[in-house]
Image: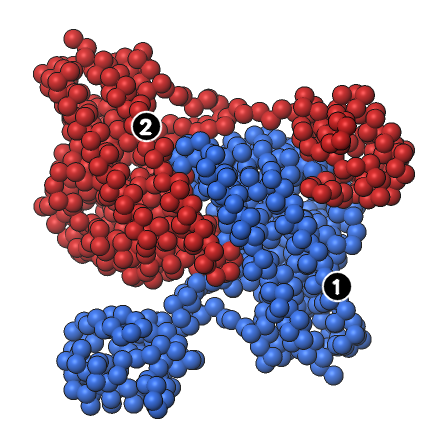
Chain colours: A blue, B red
Amino acid sequence: MAEYWSTLDVDLHLAVDPDSGRRVGLEHALREAIRDGRLAAGARLPSTRTLAVELGLARGTVSAAYDQLVAEGHLVAVRGSGTRVAAQSGRAPSDARTTDAASGAGTAAKSGTQRAADPVRFPHDLRPGTPDLSRFPREAWLRAARRAVNEAPSDVFGYGDPRGRLELRRALAEYLGRTRGVLADPEHIVIVSGALQGLALLGRVLGGGMAMEDPYIPLFHKAVRTTGTEVVPLLVDDDGARVEQLRGRAFRDVEAVVVTPSHQYPIGSTLHPARRQTLVEWAREGAGRYVVEDDYDGEFRYDRQPVGALQGMLPDRTVYLGTASKTLGPGVRLAWMVLPEALLDPVTEAKRHLDHQSETLGQVTLAEFITSHDYDRHIRASRLRYRRRRDLLAERLRTKAGRPAAGFALGGIAAGLHALVRLEPAGMSEAEVLARAAEFGLGLEGLGGLWDTGPKGRSGQNRARPQGIVVGFGSPTEAAYPRALDALVRTLSWR
Amino acid sequence: MAEYWSTLDVDLHLAVDPDSGRRVGLEHALREAIRDGRLAAGARLPSTRTLAVELGLARGTVSAAYDQLVAEGHLVAVRGSGTRVAAQSGRAPSDARTTDAASGAGTAAKSGTQRAADPVRFPHDLRPGTPDLSRFPREAWLRAARRAVNEAPSDVFGYGDPRGRLELRRALAEYLGRTRGVLADPEHIVIVSGALQGLALLGRVLGGGMAMEDPYIPLFHKAVRTTGTEVVPLLVDDDGARVEQLRGRAFRDVEAVVVTPSHQYPIGSTLHPARRQTLVEWAREGAGRYVVEDDYDGEFRYDRQPVGALQGMLPDRTVYLGTASKTLGPGVRLAWMVLPEALLDPVTEAKRHLDHQSETLGQVTLAEFITSHDYDRHIRASRLRYRRRRDLLAERLRTKAGRPAAGFALGGIAAGLHALVRLEPAGMSEAEVLARAAEFGLGLEGLGGLWDTGPKGRSGQNRARPQGIVVGFGSPTEAAYPRALDALVRTLSWR
């Protein structure tokens, strides 16, 4: 018997197996519905009378089924307000799985099927990966969209160049040159949906292997491996990627090296000038060698002079990857690759086979947003805001929580939207910090999940493998940030 | 010395080499920035005072550098409006390779590097693949975007469910059930960028081979093959895909069959009811067998009752693919898959590895567009318009050009945005028609380019392989359509 049941709140398709007895069948069907989220936490169930009528069951049968599920903790009966799905039961409201968490640079590590588990939500959230989404410039963006869409030729709605709209590629060429020192010809730019897609495209077109920083973002490693390309982890320290390793046997077949030279993710270090030089030399030595520069947060540099893009030193051998994910938000799915001549056609062709081209209305909107300088204004305002947050983070950890002697040190704070709390061997372990944070309702990301080679390294010896917590200070709202910092300070104040 | 310089409007990364003297260094840095396009023609420079402060130089040094570059013609100083980059200076952004044309269902066949050749443009264009882009409902779409983006929670700008926004999945579940008889649970819908991406995702997750109609869209065959999945061509006739072939040896390892049952592309036939039944039986016989229903133009049916989606007969074994490419335009890159339970998690996971999720602002806009019924209104108006065009096409070919005896017959006109002009052996060949069309400035698509097995078949014998011209009556503007038909009539009036 399959029944549709409507209450004030929900329509629910409830399949009651006739073979399993009516009460047991109803119990089972309800349990299933709660478990897989069709009945969300907090959802109100119909009265026993209503449901009995709708399902053609005796009211006592329905009551008995409800009682059983209350006993099991799946339902809560509150006098006067009926029966509801328990808060801890099943999946969160239908937007479960909706987000996020699964991602971002930071949490991307949590792979596996998203569907199985609820995305975890925290009262305080300092997980890295997204900017403050509440500051998305909705009004300016909508105005830009109106201008751009109204002025665009009709072909904007059609199939077009797999590289993306020329309006945007021109705007980016100017913007990237001006702000990041990137030598970008609009013809050599390919608009993609994110760094992830950019790396997957490269994985498809490169013949050899790819070296990728470790720790970095496991989803990125995995996405490249999915294309059949071998990924060789390249360890990282406080001077960025240890590029001298590229001379080793393990890297013999490596054709491209993926680095985050301006602000290593997640360690936060800047690639040392001598290492930049080593990397450039490595690339120049072999015929088909490339550096892939993931410049995911190059716009946000606070203390020192900005480090110009490495691409400016080596334009014919660098793939530059930039993104709007940290400046606007990852939902817009707009990122860009600046490609050397030799890779342009293969990547363009691979993009065409993947999804023809990226969505165009967002592209012309972003082009308008950049050329009107709304983008600069938004970034400048964001930079000030994140800088204040960064300063506040450093201040709070210096004065209110432990000192370095107490077990941690803050690093990687010269740029970007995240910092690394390096845990000293004498202090708490990552697991302990994360457990304490959970007690305070605080979401954090442990470094442990970001190693491609696992938190203990390939040998399982955990040699020189730092423990740490990645603190994303970008994502909370302005109002939520101070309380999130309070929770962080409490978490780290272990003595 | 690398400096970040901000003016009212812009940020500029300017590398001033400290060894070359301050004025000369600044001059050089500016000259380089202009030459390689980082400072675009017309860009306004900061005042000498601002720049001097920001770079820590004397104001006179900056003035002298500006003067030198004005003298060289790189900059222009306009009294009262500051200093700008000269119009002729630096690189001109080149527009070569700008577009497009490369695609659409129709022209997708023209693979190879896009870059080599300019897309061919015709004064009259009846190539299939796109709707009339000039009729994109810009104003209604922008209004929906404003409502949707203003009302959306902030998480719309973040990482989310790889399946796409729940708002859109809910709107589509209702819409598809109502208009196409699709049994769609929002939880089982995955938003993708197009049928191409949908097929590529399936290619990734399916273990066995895929049978795909032939003729169809060669880019689609190729995109699936790129994933490593074997594609077995399934021939088509006037009753749709010849599904009885599925019993043959060549199809032994086939796990999924891709069909266009409502309106075969490009032949235009409808899958015969007996064949639907055969296909359903085939799918039910084996454990992991699926039918993939590409319902690319199911909204446009003119004469008979619309043929309900096959998915309604076989929901647990059908992957339904729908798209906004024919209703709105392919530029929005919004399409949807309705998946059976067993494929949902693998496809969701593959989507996450491919590009995390599709762009979200377009998704919430389309959700609003559907729930406000603007989508229905737009489709209804479009259907009337295309039906008139279809009638006019039939009329013109009946009365003004040759009769069937004169060498051709019109078919596939019950639905969609294209028809097939079948060429009789006694008349002109495809090549002759296309050559004549080119003389009249008319773009058409020959059937020959759409065979996966080539226009002569695998045996090279060309047995029973029809010759024909695919006429897309969707893409011209209303004003251009009559003249395009004139050119078609002249092309076909060979005696």
The amino acid on which the numbered mark 2 sits, given as a three-letter code, is: Thr
Per the image, label 1 sits on a secondary structure element best described as helix
Q: Is residue A126 above or below residue A375?
A: below
Q: Nearer the viewer, residue B415 or A346?
A: B415
Q: Are marks 2 and 1 on the same chain?
A: no
Asked if residue A193 shows in the view, the reply is: yes
At horizontal 67% and vertical 29% (from top left) the residue drawn is: B42
Instruction: Provide the chain ID for the residue under circle 1.
Output: A
At horizontal 53% and vertical 51% (from top left) the residue drawn is: A139
Which mark identifies residue A391?
1
Percent x, y for residue A106? 58, 61
Q: Residue furthest top?
A: B495
Q: Residue furthest front?
A: B80
Q: Is residue A225 above or below residue A314?
A: below
**In this rendering, the label closer to the viewer, 2 or 1:** 2
Asked if residue B435 shows in the view, the reply is: no
**Corner quadrant of residue B400:** top left
* Horizontal arrangement in the rendering, residue B274 relative to residue B80 (left or right): left
Instruction: Provide the chain ID for the residue under circle 2.
Output: B
- Neighbour class for label 2 at 10 Å: few (<14), some, many (≥20)? some
At horizontal 33% and vertical 38% (from top left) the residue drawn is: B221
Percent x, y for residue A92? 42, 72
Percent x, y for residue A327? 61, 51
The amino acid on which the numbered mark 1 sits, given as a three-letter code, is: Asp
**Corner quadrant of residue B267:** top left
Residue at numbered disc 2: B477
Task: Count the labels in the image.
Answer: 2
Percent x, y for residue B231? 31, 41
